[in-house]
Image (spheres, grey):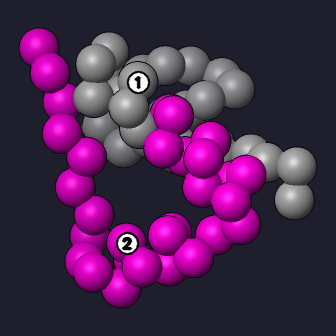
Amino acid sequence: MSYQILFFNKSVQKEIEAWPIGINASFVRITEQIEISGPNLGLPYTRPFGDGLFEIRAKGAE
C-alpha cells in the first residue's frame, strides 16, 4: 500500500518549506519513507500521538 502526504493547508506547507535547510531535508527524507512504508516508522523518525496521528521528528544541524 502506498501513502500520500497531505498538508492541512497552504500556510502550513509554506511554514514547513521555510524551515532551515537541514531540518527541511530531514523532513523530506522522512516523508518520502512514509509514502513507501507508512507513518509508523518508529523513533527517531516518527512517534504516534494516538487516533492514527503521528509526529514527524525531523532534525537538522541547525
Q: Earlier in the sequence, mark 1 or mark 2?
A: 2
User: What's drawn in magenta, residue-wise?
Assistant: 1-30
Residue depicted at x 50% and y 79%: 15
Q: Quadrant of residue 40?
A: top left
At horizontal 41% and vertical 38% (from top left) the residue drawn is 31
Residue 50 image position (x, y, % from top left): 41, 39
Q: Identify which amino acid the numbered label 1 is placed on.
A: Gln
Quarter residue 32 falls in = top left
Q: Residue at x 51, y 69 (%)?
A: 16
* Residue 45 percent coordinates (x, y): 61, 29
Picture layout, residue 21 above or below residue 55? below
Closest to the observer: 12 or 26? 26
Q: CA distance from mark 1 to mark 2?
A: 18 Å
Label 2: few (<14), some or many (≥20) within 10 Å? few
Say what secondary structure mark 1 lies in: helix
* 22 to 45, vertically: above or below: below
Residue at image mark 1: 33
Q: Please tell me the numbered disc located at residue 42.
A: none
Q: Name the secondary structure under disc 2.
A: helix
- Split into 4 quadrants, where in the image is the N terminus? top left
- Relative vertical location of residue 3 with respect to residue 8 in this rendering, above or below: above
How many numbered marks, from 0 up? 2
Instruction: Residue 54 in the image: state x and y as whole percent.
Output: 44, 40
Query: Which residue position holds label 2?
Result: 13
